[in-house]
Image: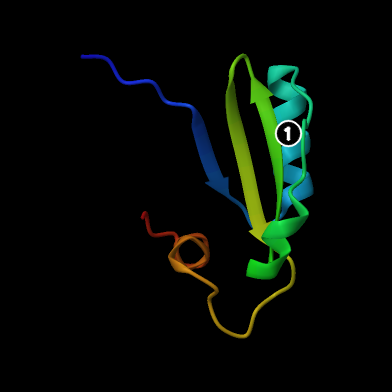
Amino acid sequence: MSLHLRQVALVARDLDQVVDDLCAVFDLAVGYNDPAIGSLQLHNAVIPVGEEFLEVVAPLVEASRPIDSSIVAVETGATC
């Protein structure tokens, strides 16, 4: 039995900085930004890597309280 990982998602404080760094280091380019994720108070960048995808999400604005567990992990340094 084999496992195929189709997408990896990262959570960041600063979407642009992380995406710029990833694209520069690995010679990649953003393929898509999903406007629908804004309803979760997030923005994202989906970067194709071969036939798989690397997605980076970040909060749209500083929230007065955590949006979800992934944001909590970024804020506290914990892992999910």
Identified at 78% across, 36% down, the residue is: 20
The quadrant where residue 51 appears: top right
Quadrant where the N terminus is found in the figure? top left
The quadrant where residue 48 appears: top right
The quadrant where residue 61 appears: bottom right
Q: Nearer the viewer, residue 15 or 5?
A: 5
| Left or right placement of residue 23 versus residue 77 in this view | right
Task: Please give the residue where the numbered disc 1 appears in the rendered image.
Answer: 21
| Left or right placement of residue 77 versus residue 65 in this view | left
Numbered-mark total: 1
**x and y percent of residue 80 in the render?**
36, 55
Considering the numbered disc 1 on the image, is that residue within a helix, a strand or a loop? helix
Identified at 77% across, 30% down, the residue is: 31
Identified at 79% across, 47% down, the residue is: 16
| Crowd band around label 1 with a 10 angstrom C-alpha radius: few (<14), some (14–19), many (20+) | few
Colouring scheme applied when the structure was drawn: rainbow
Name the residue at the bottom extreme.
Answer: 64
**x and y percent of residue 70 in the render?**
47, 60
Q: Nearer the viewer, residue 12 or 42?
A: 42
**x and y percent of residue 24 in the render?**
77, 24
User: In the image, is residue 37 above or below residue 53?
Assistant: below
**x and y percent of residue 32 in the render?**
77, 37
User: In the image, is residue 3 above or below residue 69?
Assistant: above
* Amino acid type, callout 1: Asp
Name the residue at the left extreme.
Answer: 1
User: In the image, is residue 29 above or below residue 46?
Assistant: above
| Left or right placement of residue 13 versus residue 68 in this view | right
| Left or right placement of residue 5 versus residue 52 in this view | left
Q: Nearer the viewer, residue 20 or 50?
A: 50
